[in-house]
Image: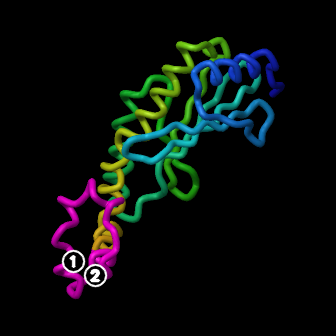
C-alpha cells in the first residue's frame, strides 16, 4: 500500500498538537507513540498510515504463565466494550491491542479519542491480568524479595494477595 503523505503530515501535526510523546517508526508512515499509564508504567503504540487507513497496535502484556483460558476469556469479554479496537494474540500468546480506522479520522478529536481508548484498554485491566496470568510468579517474587530484605514497592498493589506467602516458602 502506498503511504498517503498528506495523512502522514496530518498525523504528525495532530500528535504534536496533542503533545503526545512520539517518534518516527521503522516503517514508512509509522509513528511510535508512548502513553504514560497508572497501572502499566507505559504503553507503546504503533500508528501506521497505509493506503486509506490508519492502523494501530499496542503491546498489552506477555503470554500468561497460568490460567490461560480464564485470562483470554477475560480479554474477549472486554473486546465487546472496545470501539474500533480489539485484543489479539500473536503466535506466542502475547497480547496486543489492534485496530484500523479510515485516514479521515485523523484529526484532533479522533486521535485524542483513539489514544485515550488505547491507553484505557491497556492500562485499566493490567493489574487484573497480572493476577489472572502471573500470580504464582508474583508470589515467588514476593517471597524472594522478603527473604532477602529487598524492596517490594513494585508489588505493593498486590500486597493483599501476596503478604504471608513468605511463610510457605519451604512448602513449595
Residue nearest the viewer, comparing 115 with 52:
115
Q: Is residue 6 left or right of residue 107?
A: right
Q: Mark 2 and mark 1 in contact (Cβ < 8 Å)?
A: yes
| Magenta-colored segment: predominant secondary structure | helix
Q: Position of residue 89 (x, y in %)?
A: 52, 48
Location of residue 171 with respect to 133 vertically, above or below:
below
Q: Residues within 10 Å of mark 1 (few under 14, many from 20)?
A: some
Q: Position of residue 24 (x, y in %)?
A: 74, 36
Residue nearest the viewer, comparing 47 with 150:
150
Q: Nearer the viewer, mark 1 or mark 2?
A: 2
Q: CA distance from mark 1 to mark 2?
A: 7 Å
Residue at 52% from the left image edge and 24% from the top image edge = 114
Residue nearest the viewer, comparing 167 with 59:
167
Displayed quadrant of residue 154: bottom left
Residue at 45% from the left image edge and 23% from the top image edge = 83
Identify the secondary structure beneath mark 1.
Answer: helix
Q: Is residue 56 left or right of residue 63?
A: right
Identify the secondary structure beneath mark 2.
Answer: helix
Location of residue 87 with respect to 103 vertically, above or below:
below
Task: Find disc 1 in the rendering and name its residue.
Answer: 166
Q: Which mark is residue 85?
A: none
Q: Position of residue 20 (x, y in %)?
A: 58, 29
Task: Find disc 2 in the rendering and name its residue.
Answer: 147
Residue nearest the viewer, comparing 53 with 14:
14
Residue at 22% from the left image edge and 60% from the top image edge = 159
Q: Earlier in the sequence, mark 1 or mark 2?
A: 2
Residue 11 lies in the magenta stretch = no
Residue 165 lies in the magenta stretch = yes
Q: Which residues are magenta?
A: 143-172
Displayed quadrant of residue 47: top right
Residue at 50% from the left image edge and 55% from the top image edge = 93
Q: Quadrant of the N terminus?
A: top right
Amino acid at each position: 500500500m502506498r503511504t498517503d503523505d498528506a495523512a502522514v503530515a496530518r498525523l504528525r501535526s495532530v500528535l504534536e498538537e496533542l503533545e503526545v510523546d512520539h517518534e518516527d517508526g521503522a516503517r514508512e508512515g509509522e509513528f511510535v507513540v508512548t502513553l504514560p499509564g497508572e497501572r502499566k508504567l507505559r504503553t507503546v503504540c504503533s500508528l501506521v498510515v497505509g493506503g486509506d487507513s490508519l492502523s494501530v497496535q499496542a503491546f498489552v502484556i506477555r503470554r500468561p504463565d497460568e490460567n490461560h483460558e480464564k485470562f483470554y476469556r477475560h480479554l474477549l469479554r472486554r473486546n465487546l466494550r472496545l470501539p474500533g479496537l480489539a485484543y489479539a494474540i500473536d503466535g506466542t500468546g502475547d497480547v496486543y491491542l489492534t485496530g484500523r480506522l479510515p485516514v479521515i479520522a485523523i484529526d484532533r478529536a479522533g486521535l485524542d479519542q483513539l489514544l485515550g481508548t488505547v491507553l484505557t484498554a491497556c492500562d485499566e485491566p493490567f493489574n487484573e491480568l497480572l493476577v489472572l496470568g502471573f500470580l504464582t510468579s508474583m508470589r515467588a517474587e514476593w517471597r524472594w524479595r522478603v527473604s532477602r530484605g529487598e524492596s517490594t514497592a513494585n508489588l505493593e498493589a498486590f500486597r493483599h494477595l501476596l503478604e504471608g506467602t513468605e511463610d510457605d516458602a519451604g512448602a513449595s
